[in-house]
Amino acid sequence: MKSEMITPAAAALSRLKPLSSAAALEADSLSQASQDAVTDFLKAGTAANTVRSYQGALIYWSAWLQVRYGVALGDGPIPPAVAIQFIIDHLKRPQADGTWTHNLPPSADQALVDAKIKATLGPHSYNTVSLRMAVLGKWHRIKGWDSPTESKEVKVLMRDAQKAQARGGITIRKKTALVAEPFKAILDTCKDDGLRGIRDRALLLLAWSGGGRRRSEVVGLQVSDVRKLDADTWLYSLGVTKTDTAGVRREKPLTGPAAQALTAWLGAAPIESGPLFRGMLRGGQVGTAPMTGHEVGRIVQRRAKLAGLEGDWGAHSLRSGFVTEAGRQGVPLGDVMAMTEHTSVSTVMGYFQSGNLLNSSATTLLSGYVMPDPDEDAENIRNN
């Protein structure tokens, strides 16, 4: 941490009195404090799937505050110094001797694990800390409080922590983008798999070809949200999503294989109303309950394994894969964003550019150079 951040952090932290025992977790008060915080998000109109993610972050904040300072979440705004302590408690950082460390005391770490608030002992990934800081910031804004995440010290620390981890070889994990070739291999695993395979193929093609839909958007679709135009074209309607909370219905097209897969699913199930994609019962029968977002991720992972694909696969692989493949095929960015409904160009550009550059002349500046025959190289090595 830079020296200009240590002084204000230390000064503010010195005014806070931690618990005498790191094991002083009270499940009832934790639950109530966290529930109150989650209610704030619900009142703010946050999507239900996002609320669940926020709930986990707020539960952790509540527990950590009790363990470290003996204060309850919601008593008042959290000072920037406490946010800084959270960061250095959970992110590994390099030492002069080449080792890495983090500041969370072993007793506090163990208390959080014992309370099942933390899965394992040790530091968090940068992604996890970043998410929890973002949730803390949004919660403060809902409360009308100044957010510690907006302070210069916290922003600089998060930026420098990310750089330090990158230089130390700790990469920020992203789900592998599911571009066309591996996606086709995944779809092939749906053959000869009964109703489950027909369902999975329709779900995967709608999510990917339909604009890289988020898992919450896919499982939230109802039969009444889709309508057939012709043999090769369907339209499906989106309502409230993560980036569009107004609830105005927007129709997106499904053509070709995606439309055919949806026709096959609705014909084989068959279902006339209720959730479009449902869980399967024993014996391969279609249930009545809608699928969950986690099930979408598990389908991608299972199918990728069956296809023998290496990578870190998940539900987001469908969204990032659609954007990356669109870039590879030269689809205009505006058309891509119209399908995905990304509201930020910077968010979508990372995946889009990685695909678009594959066909760029900037990657073929030495196209006239002819590499030596590998057998000649091998012969030269033996002779020398």
Image (cartoon, rainbow, N blue to C red):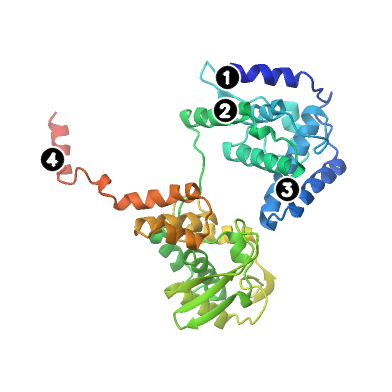
Q: Is residue 159 above or below residue 208?
A: above
Lower position in the chain sequence, tag 4 or tag 1: 1
Dots 1 and 3: beta carbons under 8 Å?
no
Q: Residue at (49%, 75%) from the top-left corner?
A: 261
* Other-residue count near label 1 (Cα within 10 Å), few / some / many at <14 / 14–19 / ≥20: few
| Amino acid type of the residue tagged 2 in the rendering | Val
Which residue matches tag 3?
Answer: 55
* Other-residue count near label 3 (Cα within 10 Å), few / some / many at <14 / 14–19 / ≥20: some
Lower position in the chain sequence, tag 2 or tag 4: 2
Lower position in the chain sequence, tag 3 or tag 2: 3
Q: Residue at (12%, 31%) from the top-left corner?
A: 383
Which residue matches tag 2?
Answer: 156
CA gap, disc 4 and disc 1: 54 Å
Which residue matches tag 4?
Answer: 376
Dots 2 and 1: beta carbons under 8 Å?
yes
CA gap, disc 4 and disc 3: 62 Å
* Other-residue count near label 2 (Cα within 10 Å), few / some / many at <14 / 14–19 / ≥20: some
Q: Secondary structure at mark 1?
A: loop
Q: Secondary structure at mark 4?
A: helix
